[in-house]
Amino acid sequence: MRESRDVVRQITVAASATFALIGAFVGSGAYGGTPVQEVAGGALSADATVIAPAGSAFTIWSVIYFGLVAYAVWQMLPKQTNTELHRRVGYWVAASLVLNAAWILSIQFDMLALSVPVIILLLLVLIRAYLITVKLPAAGAVDAIITDGTIGLYLGWVCVATAANIAAWLNAIGFDGFGISQDVWGIVVVAVAGAAGIALAARGRTHFAPALSLSWGLAWLAVARLTGDLISQPTAIAAIIAVAAVLTSTAVFAIAQLRAEQKA
């Protein structure tokens, strides 16, 4: 019975990955779709809000999708079939893939308001998947790279994407920030993102991937605010500081964990 459930889980993950890839092609502008940066009147473009990263930041999706496809194949291999890690995390990964495609579809149909709860739910699902990978160690370096690494990169980037998505929706509906300047809001949101990165590092210890993708997003946010049409030096400086804080804290927590393991 348990083996049958394993097969169902594996097929579900593989099918979800296929669905997400189709959505990715549509979201890139292929098959009649509109590039994400151009939908909803450009609400998600690099200069729509001070929280939007430069367009080059989105190249990270190629790495994430490659990792997700690799995971879909990896978790189907005989040696991975009955491991506790994949049994616990598989359906969460599948759910994230479906939500990813749902987010792209909501954007393609100009339903920016719907995209907000979808991406928030995606973020929560990825947090759950990440916590499972932290609790259950991977079976070797390859498993760690494919499973832990992919989920971590996915989560770190979605942290940035969620903030940008919410900001885009608020801007689209005419939210004026309660009269507070966009520079101040930019600093606040970037600080929250940085704090999230530090929290993930503290929980994951030797899990580096979330810090890398989150820092990637923040770095490109800084580039957009220094070189794009919407200049905000305070937001850019805050983003640079956040990147330094996230990467430094990640290194500190990892070193502390490795030293503790050596002493044990």
Image (cartoon, grey):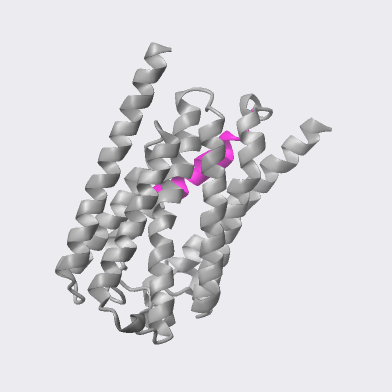
Q: Residue furthest bottom?
A: 174
Pick whichever, 173 or 22, lies toward us.
Answer: 173
Please count the marks in the image. 0
Name the image quarter holding the C terminus.
top left
Residue 11, quarter of the rendered image: top right
Question: What percent of the width, then of the height, locates residue 58?
Answer: 35, 59
Residue at 63% across / 41% down in the picture? 90
Question: Residues in magenta?
Answer: 63-77
Q: Is residue 155 left or right of residue 176?
A: right
Q: Main secondary structure of the magenta part?
A: helix
Is residue 165 something that shows in the picture? Answer: yes
Residue at 44% across / 56% down in the picture? 158
Is residue 35 something that shows in the picture? Answer: no
Residue at 38% across / 67% down in the picture? 164
Question: What percent of the width, then of the height, locates residue 166?
Answer: 43, 71
Question: What percent of the width, then of the height, locates residue 203?
Answer: 45, 38
Question: What percent of the width, then of the height, locates residue 136?
Answer: 56, 30
Name the image quarter holding the N terminus.
top right
Residue 58 position (above or below residue 12): below
Q: Residue furthest top?
A: 263
